Amino acid sequence: MDEIRSCLEEQQVDAGLLEDIEQFRKRYPVSEKEKDRVLCPQMPFYGKEVFEMAAAALLQGENILLTGTKATGKNVLAENLAWLFRRPLYNISFHVNTDSSSLIGTDTFRNNEVQLRTGPVYEAAKNGGFAVLDEVNMAKNDAVSVLHAVLDYRRILDVPGYERVVLHEASRFIGTMNYGYAGTRELNEALVSRFLVIDMPSVSEENLSRVLYRVFPDMKAEGMKQICGLFMDLQTKALNHEISTKPLDLRGLIGALKTVRGGLSPRLAIRMGIVNKSFDVFERELVEDIVMTRIPSDWTAAALFSF
């Protein structure tokens, strides 16, 4: 059985919803040329209610916007949804230079003639893909104008000078946004109205330990308790605005633990993956103090992992 699906069944996700997803997959098979974009996620998503809301919306032809603070699993959820629905996945990371041509495509000279080099939104529209609009609140007006047409009931994409594309019935758009990142702004009302919005809750200690055990099945119970406790401490501090969200980095934590399993001291590894993500000296000292309460200086890799 699909490991991602089995994890959802363990969380008692609605069986009827999973069956509807199975029917969706049968109704919209993926073309051979797009199969390399159907990627199995590295880790499952933990969060029954959030998954059910997202899946139900996508099944009804809606697009979803995942909002929330850092390390809430927005991209993990998007990857899990694309895999379970067996759709080609197109990632679009918005930045200050993302414009309409970045999304639709641009002219290129090929075979002695001008042709369209297609962009990710065009490809998702044509091939029934799931397009992840990462940090969509960084989109400029030029890019937003493209999204308005593809996200509403018209489901069309006008490609100036080429064609008018009607979106594939399986095409969906999943927006993600963090609060307060540099370069972000408030989404305009017209764009937000084209999404169903899911506010992602902060990760719980139980779900964090599930994720870490999935990546590090050989981690010792006491080590897991302290590592999860450290992350929860940082999360509480960030939610209370005592520190920024920079040290609240799950990718950094997993990367640090990989170096510990390779033999590095836990304190040094955590410094690379968590502490040094803060560039403010005062904040870095505060985070270091939090780490000291959880990770003793004399701990070695053997304190966290069974070798």
Image (tube, rainbow, N blue to C red):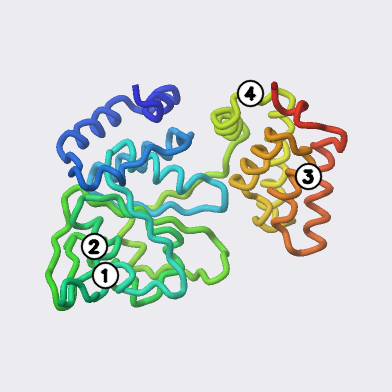
Q: CA distance from mark 1 to mark 4?
A: 46 Å
For label 1, count other residues whose C-alpha is less than 10 Å away and answer few (under 14), some (14-19) or many (20+): some
State which mark lies toward you, 3 or 2: 3
Residue 268 disc label = 3
Q: Residue 64, how many percent across, how many down?
A: 35, 52
Residue 122 disc label = 2
Q: Residue 266, how many percent across, how many down?
A: 76, 38
Q: CA distance from mark 1 to mark 2?
A: 7 Å
Quadrant housing residue 14: top left
Identify which residue, 191 or 39, lies in the foreground: 39
Q: In the rendered structure, which amino acid carries the disc numbered 1?
A: Gly
Say which residue appears at 50% left-offset and 44% top-offset. 73
Q: Pointer 1 and pointer 2: residues touching (CB < 8 Å)? A: yes
Identify which residue, 167 or 258, lies in the foreground: 258
In the image, residue 54 above or below residue 114: above
Element class at badge 2: helix
Residue 218 disc label = 4
Q: CA distance from mark 1 to mark 3?
A: 45 Å
Q: Please name the residue that numbered disc 1 is placed on.
A: 105
